[in-house]
Amino acid sequence: MDRPAAPAFNATRFRLGEVLVSRGLISESQLQQALATQKTTGRKLGRALTDLKLVTEAQIGGVVADQMGLEFIDLAQRDLDPATVKLLPEARARRFRALVIGRRPAGLEVGLVDPSDMVAFDALSRLLGTTVHPAVVAEDALLAAIDRIYQRSEEISGLARELAADMGEGVLSLASLETSSGAEEAPVVRLLHSLFQTAVARDVSDIHIEPQERQLQIRFRIDGVMQVQSAPDPRIAAAVVQRLKLMSNLDISEKRLPQDGRFRMTVGHTVLDVRISTLPTQYGEAVVMRLLAQNTERMKLAALGIPEPILKRLRAALASPAGMVLVTGPTGSGKTTTLYAALAELNTPETKIITVEDPVEYRLPGLTQVQINDKIDLSFSRVLRSCLRQDPDVILVGEMRDQETAEIGLRAALTGHLVLSTLHTNDSAGTPMRLRDMGIAPYMVALGLRLVLAQRLVRTICPNCRVPAEPPAHEREWLGEDLKDTSGPSSGTGAGKYTAFRGTGCSQCHDSGYRGRMAVYEMLEMTPALVHLANRDDPAGFMAEARRAFADFTLRRGALALVAEGRTTVAEAMRVGAGV
């Protein structure tokens, strides 16, 4: 069979640095700096230039495309068909830095980082068995697209098969799992590394490893929703779990009881703190890993999307020398992220901050952080008493779990300390009543509690596949009068100005219609009227006054505002607004 003829394009090599200088994108001295870096690192000049942040990959791609008479394609703006992309095996796509991005009447359009590499071009023509129409793409965008579409599924499945073959029918050898020379080449290590790489690329919050009767189910939680990643041979479950236990310093001989641990690892440029929990099940030990990226950019209150009126009052509460600030919401609603963003603003050389957590989720320099350990009776209440003798200005308590902890925290708030913590309540208005239900004296709640911030996370619509969508009858019924109050283009429902949107699903969002999450907030500030009502046995009066104090800043209204802006769906607003 004859090889398909390649289309004509200018494959003549050129000096990238000279072209960039001639176009004024870099100076001669910057070129020399990049050339020196290239000699040191052994990387290509283009990568050296981008690492030094002298040019962007898009700028380099545009220059290469112009020089070769090709089109430069921004993959972030291109909706790719996974079936078409997967015409090229994942391993070859990574090796040749190539991606099939579309079909042509005669052949396939293929994005290449370096179209001048004729060896790679010829190999791609043979592999695909058709004419290759090249285009130029940026390397980072190409690798992100490969991670997004292939999800390393071939690599993970291959490593799982290799691990199962190594194990055969024999008993798992502990020596083969322990850290030693060459351990990084073991299939189980490479399998886990590939899982973590995929998880980081897809912004996964949790990895679930669940042994079943006929398979080992591996699932990711992405934007709060579980998605199946892989289902390899169940025989490898023991090897995977034991390796994770070794990494977490857990007891590998104990398989009958749950265990908790943690470890830290680096994936690319991301440092991950991994919290691990094991649970004995019918078919073996299940493992859940919470991934916490140590990304300081996320530790800023201004970057959390808190409405300006709420943010202003929150910062005023944080600036006070005493009082308790509580953040409430269900598990996984971002409470700890909000608290650490607050700590990052309070963290100065003049301020003594102590955190008491179970476990310590983020690590900030300058803080004194204490890990609770119930096995040795190192409880919240015990550590809190000791903390007060350490002369702190600010105390962070991971959670108000019981009466004793809440009482000590409120006493600290009443005696000149700023106390930050979390509490599981449905909304902010119910928090003072929840503290009273825990057995706390009304006067302590009224005088010690300063501010409550309630929050929820809602999934945001994928901007790549967002389209207008008429809300179905049950959603319009739930919206009710809110339709008349929400600003925006006409919905055509006759109910007022309103447009709903949804995501149709695309390669950018893995056909979910959603990409990313945003928080919605409501805040209860203890005004003199609320303090007075909190001291009285009048829950109904307190709740009525609290509702008046919210004005429009409720969880429901926050979610509806995102719907009106076209950033989330009515279904997501219903999920967040249910019962609040």
Image: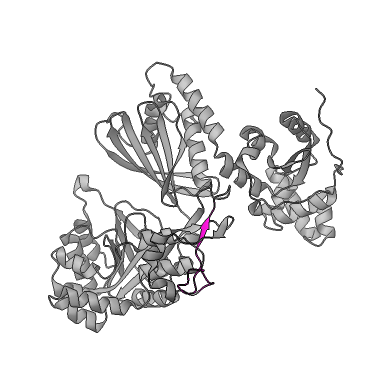
513 displayed left or right of 482:
right
Residue in front for this viewpoint, 351 or 129: 129
Q: Give the residue furthest to the top.
A: 169
Residue 257: name its quadrant: top left
User: What is the quadrant of the C terminus in the image?
Assistant: bottom left
Relative to residue 201, is residue 121 drawn left or right? Answer: right
Relative to 524, residue 222 above or below: above
Relative to 106, 219 lies left or right: left
Quarter of the N terminus within the rendering: top right
Q: Main secondary structure of the magenta part?
A: loop
Which residue is pictured at 75% across the width and 58% down the height?
30
Q: Which residues are magenta?
A: 488-504
- Colour treatment of the image: one colour
Residue at 39% over, 75% down: 310
Query: Which is nearer the eye, 522 or 206?
Result: 522
Q: Position of residue 123 (x, y in %)?
A: 75, 30
Compared to residue 132, the image places residue 321 above or below, namely below
Instruction: Judge whether 249 appears above or below 460 on screen.
Output: above
Q: Nearer the viewer, residue 344 or 158?
A: 158
Q: Position of residue 70 (x, y in %)?
A: 81, 48
Whether the magenta-drawn stretch holds residue 108 is answered as no
Residue 413 is situated, as x and y percent measured from the top left of the image, at: 24, 72
Q: Quadrant of residue 485?
A: bottom left
For the point 46% across and 53% down, which residue is it? 294
Asked whether residue 182 appears in the rendered view, the answer is no
Q: Is residue 493 magenta?
A: yes
Q: Is residue 555 visible?
A: yes
Q: Position of residue 555 (x, y in %)?
A: 36, 67
